[in-house]
Image (cartoon, rainbow, N blue to C red):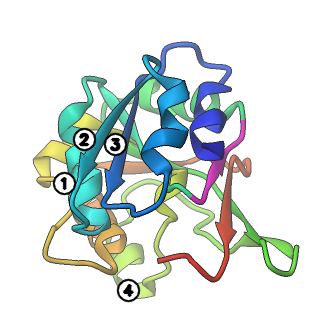
């Protein structure tokens, strides 16, 4: 619910929210019911992050797609700050930002080291293997479709694989502001 609230609180007004419940066995569906009709809620058997993210992409109708894991939060200006590079240059297909890590069990917070450059990044992503945190991304749909989304064969590292493939077809733009909080806790996948 907190992740959804962080998207609903965006300063950019035109947001479509698709939530994919990937086989949760708790009261997720009931907790999210209060957000209807402002969200589209899809339920599926547990198949992992790649399958869930692809289901969300297929269900959405927007030109730009962002991802937010259920543990994570977007700062209110996230979309507003990440859209300009995409609108200014059709070759930019991915915008990313630094992420703040919040260890919920210790209360410790720190910034996740990320790339401090942008542009054509295929070599950097492949060689350095540092990746870009998925919840920080705002992507152009046509580039996601060009690489056929997340590889559903991967349960882990599907985000890094997608970034490498995206970097082969489009430029990346970095917004230097920390606009995503990734919450780490013992129940994270």
Mark 3 or mark 2, which is nearer the start of the sequence?
A: 2
Residue annotated with mark 2: 57
Name the residue located 68 percent from the left edge and 20 percent from the top edge: 11
**Marks 3 and 4, how far apart at CA:** 20 Å
Q: 40 or 10, which lies in front?
A: 40
Q: Quadrant of the N terminus?
A: top right
Q: Is residue 85 left or right of residue 166?
A: right
Residue annotated with mark 3: 93
Residue annotated with mark 1: 149
Q: Is residue 124 left or right of residue 34?
A: left
Q: How many marks?
A: 4
As drawn, the label of residue 78 is none
Name the residue located 61 percent from the left edge and 52 percent from the top edge: 97
**Marks 1 and 4, how far apart at CA:** 21 Å
Q: Is residue 98 above or below residue 28?
A: below
* Residues under numbered marks 2 and 1 in contact, where contact means CB atoms less than 8 Å apart: yes
Q: Residues within 10 Å of mark 1 (few under 14, many from 20)?
A: many
Does the stretch in magenta take in 87?
no
Depth-wise, is mark 3 or mark 1 nearer the camera?
1
Q: Position of residue 130 (x, y in %)?
A: 50, 80
**Marks 2 and 4, how far apart at CA:** 28 Å
Q: Which residues are magenta?
A: 71-75
Q: Residues within 10 Å of mark 2 (few under 14, many from 20)?
A: many
Q: Position of residue 171 (x, y in %)?
A: 36, 49
* Residues under numbered marks 3 and 1 in contact, where contact means CB atoms less than 8 Å apart: no
Mark 4 or mark 1, which is nearer the start of the sequence?
A: 4
**Marks 2 and 1, how far apart at CA:** 8 Å
Q: Position of residue 47 (x, y in %)?
A: 22, 68
Q: Is residue 34 above or below residue 130?
A: above
């Amino acid at each position: 619910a907190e992740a959804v609230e962080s998207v609903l609180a965006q300063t950019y007004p035109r947001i479509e929210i698709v939530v994919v419940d990937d086989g949760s066995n708790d009261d997720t569906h009931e907790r999210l019911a209060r957000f209807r009709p402002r969200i589209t809620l899809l339920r599926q058997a547990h198949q992992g992050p790649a399958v869930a993210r692809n289901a969300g992409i297929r269900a959405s109708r927007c030109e730009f797609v962002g991802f937010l894991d259920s543990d994570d939060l977007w700062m209110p200006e996230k979309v507003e700050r990440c859209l300009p590079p995409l609108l200014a240059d059709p070759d930019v297909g991915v915008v990313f930002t630094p992420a703040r890590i919040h260890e919920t069990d210790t209360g410790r917070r720190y910034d996740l080291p990320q790339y401090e450059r942008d542009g054509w990044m295929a070599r950097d992503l492949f060689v350095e293997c540092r990746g870009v945190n998925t919840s920080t991304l705002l992507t152009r749909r046509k580039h996601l479709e060009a690489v056929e989304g997340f590889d559903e064969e991967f349960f882990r590292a599907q985000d890094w694989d997608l970034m490498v493939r995206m970097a082969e077809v489009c430029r990346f733009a970095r917004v230097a502001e920390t606009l995503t909080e990734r919450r780490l806790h013992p129940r994270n996948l």
